[in-house]
Image (cartoon, grey):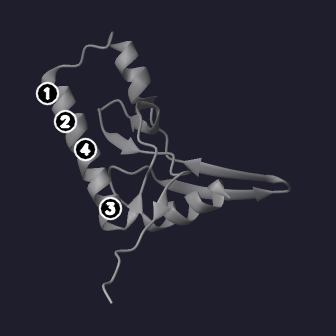
């Protein structure tokens, strides 16, 4: 059920700071999701630089995280599992939010 929810959510999200779902392959008793490739996640990247990020790098990554989160919220999606392992980074330090398995759509309550 989490894979089906993730597929439904990612089909609606198209943003430079959200990972792209490229294809879904259905096999007997198996569902394969094909995503765009990014070299690292934030945890591995931070470990590779000894945990020392420059202030400009922190600012850049945080800005991209805010842009991606803002887009998700504007699209009425809450991720609910943001952590370094779910933030993918390519060789040019472009950040993309991934792993929408726990994400939920929400609606704004309408007063009666």
Question: In the picture, which quadrant includes the C terminus?
Answer: bottom left
| Residue that badge 2 annotates | 60
Asked whether the residues under the numbered discs 1 and 2 touch, taking CB atoms below 8 Å apart as contact, a structural biologist would say yes
Helix, strand or loop at mark 2: helix
Where residue 64 is drawn, which disc sits there?
4
**Callout 2 environment at 10 Å: few (<14), some (14 to 19), or many (20+)?**
some
Residue 8: x %, y % from top left? 56, 66
- Real-space CA distance between mark 1 and mark 2, rounded to the nearest whole angstrom: 6 Å
**Whole-number angstrom distance, CA of label 3 to CA of label 2:** 20 Å
Q: Are marks 3 and 2 in contact (CB under 8 Å)?
A: no
Q: How far apart are marks 3 and 1 (CA)?
A: 26 Å
The circle drawn on residue 73 is 3
* Residues at marks 4 and 2 touching, judged by CB atoms closer than 8 Å: yes
Q: In this view, does 39 lie to the left or right of 29?
A: left
Q: Residues within 10 Å of mark 4 (few under 14, many from 20)?
A: many
Would you place residue 67 above or below residue 107 in this image?
above
Q: Where is residue 21 in the image (x, y as percent from the top left)?
A: 52, 55
State the separation of the CA atoms marked 4 and 2: 6 Å
Alpha carbon separation for disc pair 4 and 3: 14 Å
Which dot marks residue 56? 1
Q: Distance between the residues labelled 1 and 4?
A: 12 Å
Residue at the spot x=30%, y=85% of the render?
111
| For discs 3 and 1, the disc positioned in front in the rendered view | 3
**Is label 1 in a helix, a strand or a loop?**
helix
Q: Of callouts 4 and 3, which one flags the residue occurring earlier in the amino acid sequence?
A: 4
> What residue is rendered at 35% in x and 67% in y?
75
What residue is shown at x 49% (from left), y 40% (from top)? 37
Q: Which of 91 and 55 is in front in this view?
A: 55
Q: Position of residue 15 (x, y in %)?
A: 34, 58
């Amino acid at each position: 059920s989490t894979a089906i929810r993730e597929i439904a959510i990612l089909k609606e999200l198209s943003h430079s700071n959200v990972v792209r779902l490229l294809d879904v392959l259905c096999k007997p008793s198996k569902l394969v999701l094909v995503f765009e490739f990014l070299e690292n996640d934030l945890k591995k990247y931070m470990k590779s630089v000894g945990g020392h990020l420059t202030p400009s790098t922190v600012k850049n990554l945080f800005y991209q995280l805010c842009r991606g989160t803002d887009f998700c919220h504007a699209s009425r999606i809450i991720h609910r599992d943001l952590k370094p392992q779910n933030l993918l980074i390519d060789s040019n330090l472009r950040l993309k939010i991934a792993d929408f398995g726990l994400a939920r759509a929400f609606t704004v309550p309408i007063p009666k």
